[in-house]
């Protein structure tokens, strides 16, 4: 077999096209794909516990039941801890959101003034601005203040933002609640009937392709397991590093903010930026007497991001996918262009599975020995069918 054909440009073209088509399909069924993805993550996290229980002599049914009960107790305990805090903070969430909006507005204005103070070449001549004191890119000169009308208009927009979108946010949250309730249900049956489902699929495979198909199942499952475990390991490392840094800077609830930002980073690029901006906004709101704290938080996020790119990611996700960095970046951009935010979130696991399947299918269709065995077996079945005619 010529292995250069098995992983050549035609195979990779098919991998890229199949990934794009799957992303478009998943975008239309995101309400089902997202809980399915979370259930798969839970399956790979809990399957070692089920295997440990089975190694101690329990049946699979009993092991899955015990693990599911323990998971339910853990989630219920977390709910009793988190839900009261959310309920106490949600009664005046519109006022808090408006406060954070005003804090962000003040932070932007102070940043513009600082930049215009230390970089005066960004200002046009006085004649071009008409004496207003505003630079051509919107930076305010040192000592100048924005007009009251523009300030009042921006404040009114910030204050009206919660009232404008609160109904849409509530309806969207209610729409996702039934979908997310499917996660423990799917996880239970993945743990219980996973091996049985694999045997069901294997029975439909011709004998000539049996070994390669088993290898395909193993590679796909191993790829998904390694990717999700690598993603969770990367999230834990980010949360610990950010939490320690935020605790050192003196923020309240540093590890909660760090965990939230680390989970938001599952969405490539946009999630990392949104998580960083959220923590910066919280730092500026909770510590107004420390004007340099938001910039210190930005420096912390930049440092952790560099650790991600050069240390953490090669040790976790990089090892799991075995993919060139250039291909990774291009596929993330392509996934965002094809399927939007859902494409950014799903492109890497989908690409990992399709890449493994495409490479093995490429080996199958170029393996003359396997194809000869399949043609010979089909010829024997035809002869057997004609023998009694």
Image (tube, rainbow, N blue to C red):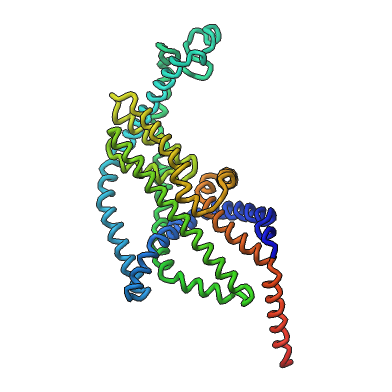
340 in relation to 40, above or below: above
Q: Quadrant of the C terminus?
A: bottom right
Q: Quadrant of the N terminus?
A: bottom right
From the viewer's perspective, tell me whether residue 20 is left or right of residue 235: right
The residue depicted at 33 percent of the width and 31 percent of the height is 283
| Front residue of 16 and 373 | 373
**What percent of the width, then of the height, locates residue 327?**
59, 47
The residue depicted at 65 percent of the width and 57 percent of the height is 7
| Front residue of 329 and 291 | 329
Does residue 203 appear in this view?
A: yes
Quadrant position of residue 128: top right
From the viewer's perspective, tell me whether residue 91 is left or right of residue 309: left
**What percent of the width, then of the height, locates residue 333?**
57, 43
| Front residue of 271 and 370 | 370
**What percent of the width, then of the height, locates residue 55?**
35, 72
Residue at the limit of the structure toward the bottom, as seen here: 388
Does residue 336 appear in this view?
A: no
Quadrant position of residue 162: top left
The residue depicted at 51 percent of the width and 45 percent of the height is 341
């Amino acid at each position: 077999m010529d292995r250069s054909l098995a992983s050549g440009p035609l195979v990779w073209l098919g991998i890229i096209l199949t990934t794009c088509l799957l992303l478009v399909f998943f975008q239309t069924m995101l309400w089902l794909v997202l809980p399915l993805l979370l259930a798969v993550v839970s399956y790979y996290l809990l399957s070692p516990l089920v295997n440990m229980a089975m190694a101690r002599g329990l049946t699979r049914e009993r092991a899955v039941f015990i693990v599911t009960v323990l998971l339910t107790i853990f989630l219920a305990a977390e709910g009793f801890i988190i839900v009261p805090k959310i309920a106490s903070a949600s009664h005046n969430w519109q006022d808090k959101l408006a406060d954070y909006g005003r804090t962000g507005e003040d932070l932007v204005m102070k940043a513009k003034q600082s930049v215009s103070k230390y970089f005066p070449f960004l200002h046009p001549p006085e004649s071009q601005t008409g004496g207003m004191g505003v630079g051509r890119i919107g930076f305010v000169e040192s000592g100048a203040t924005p007009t009251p009308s523009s300030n009042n208009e921006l404040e009114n927009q910030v204050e009206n933002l919660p009232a404008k979108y609160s109904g849409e946010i509530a309806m969207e949250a209610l729409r996702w609640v039934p979908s997310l309730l499917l996660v423990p249900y799917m996880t239970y049956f993945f743990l219980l009937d996973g091996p049985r489902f694999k045997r069901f699929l294997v029975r439909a495979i011709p004998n000539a392709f049996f070994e390669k198909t088993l290898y395909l199942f193993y590679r796909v499952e191993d790829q998904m397991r390694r990717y999700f475990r690598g993603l969770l390991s990367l999230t834990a490392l980010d949360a610990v590093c950010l939490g320690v840094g935020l605790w050192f800077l003196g923020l309240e609830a540093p590890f909660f903010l760090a965990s939230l930002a680390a989970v938001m980073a599952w969405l490539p690029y946009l999630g990392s930026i949104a998580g960083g901006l959220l923590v910066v906004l919280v730092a500026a709101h909770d510590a107004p007497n420390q004007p340099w704290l938001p910039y210190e938080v930005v420096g912390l996020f930049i440092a952790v991001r560099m650790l991600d790119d050069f240390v953490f990611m090669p040790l976790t996700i990089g090892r799991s996918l075995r993919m060139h960095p250039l291909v990774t970046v291009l596929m993330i951009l392509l996934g965002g262009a094809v399927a939007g935010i859902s494409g950014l979130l799903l492109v890497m696991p989908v690409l990992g599975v399709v890449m493994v399947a495409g490479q093995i299918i490429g080996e199958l269709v170029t393996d003359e020995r396997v194809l000869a065995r399949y043609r010979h077996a089909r010829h024997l079945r035809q002869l057997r069918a004609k023998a009694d005619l």
